[in-house]
Amino acid sequence: MASKTLSAADFETPIESRFFEDYLPGAVYEYGSYEVTEAEVLEFASRFDPQRMHTDKLYAQVGPFNGLIASGWHTTAIFMRLFADHFLSKVATLPSPGIDEIRWLLPVRPGDSLKLRTTVVKARVSNSKPDRGLVTTKAELFNQDGQAVMSLLAVNLLFTRPPL
Amino acid sequence: MASKTLSAADFETPIESRFFEDYLPGAVYEYGSYEVTEAEVLEFASRFDPQRMHTDKLYAQVGPFNGLIASGWHTTAIFMRLFADHFLSKVATLPSPGIDEIRWLLPVRPGDSLKLRTTVVKARVSNSKPDRGLVTTKAELFNQDGQAVMSLLAVNLLFTRPPL
């Protein structure tokens, strides 16, 4: 894992002992980078999103895309890798109920180096199950030119810290 | 490509000559199936979503998950494969602006056989560029027991049919 924390600020608690209470609304952190390779763009797309703008270099060159562009689902998968490696607790995370507002803002291309910015938007303890809470996080991916290429709202369910 | 149209109804126009006008609000089609293998669950998760419920068979067996479950992003990638193979025009599709309301409703497991149901929700020509339109589609994945495992709202940009 080559990526690391890029922002001055980060969680006070390491990812192996992080619980719901550690996700503070307003906290902003940055992690990266993820290097996008042509081989991975082609392989992901040929398996999961075989549209020519993602799989066919010649077509992509002459089309309006000015070269090969990554599948949007490849971009969200790259988001997830950085999010799992640096943000989501290794011990308290339950399966996510869902994601809102994925926006693919600009093409992602082979050679791009992507950085994740996370902003905790809200956090609330579950009404029905007080041993867990829901954390909503705005996630943004930026390329090496500082352009936002993707954003989404992630909802994650995490256990609260157990009593000592 | 082993999957095929499963519903009695399908587009009247083949995928190689389909344009914006062929996406009729209210139309419901089904496509499948996609067989989920343990090897693919492990490979996808180890690369993009290395959480133990997705990558560690022993952990997943003793945890609350009752066995390995696929990454939600693997499930959306499987949706995309069926969507690209059967639904999205091969000639008129531009990059999608985004996705709303991804809901992971039930675990997807190795051995599952997934079917896609598409429902065109709305379709409107672009105000600023009348040679294209936006199609909003509700997509649902069902497993072999008929249970919905995932749903989302896809927004796709497609060219209108060129004048003869």
Image (cartoon, coloured by chain):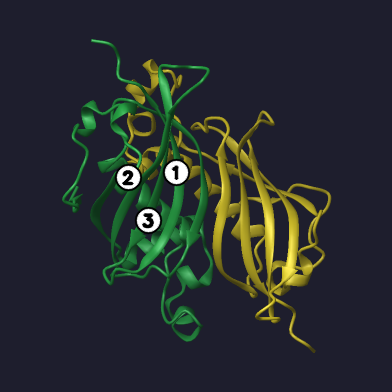
Chain colours: A yellow, B green
Please, what secondary structure does the residue beneath circle 1 have? Answer: strand
> Helix, strand, or loop for circle 3?
strand
Q: What residue type is labelled 1?
A: Ala
Which chain letter matches label 2? B
- The kind of residue tagged 2 is Phe
Q: On the image, numbered disc 1 is attached to which residue?
A: B154
Residue A123 in the image, given as x and y percentages of width and height: 74, 64
Residue B92, image quadrant = top left
Crowdedness near tag 2: few (<14), some (14–19) or many (≥20) residues, C-alpha within 10 Å: many
Quadrant in the rendering for residue A113: top right
Q: Residue at x 67, y 58 (%)?
A: A86
Q: Sequence-wise, which precedes: disc 2 or disc 1?
A: 2
The answer to whether the residue labelled 3 contacts the one labelled 2, judged by CB atoms less than 8 Å apart, is no
Instruction: Give the residue number, with chain letter if any, for mark 3.
Output: B140
Q: What residue type is labelled 3?
A: Glu
Regarding mark 2 in the picture, which secondary structure is present there?
A: helix
Alpha-carbon span between mark 2 and mark 1: 10 Å
C-alpha gap between disc 3 and disc 1: 11 Å
Q: Indicate whether B38 appears above or below B91.
A: below
Quarter of the rendering containing residue B86: top left
Q: Are marks 2 and 1 in contact (CB under 8 Å)?
A: yes
What residue is disc 2 on? Answer: B83
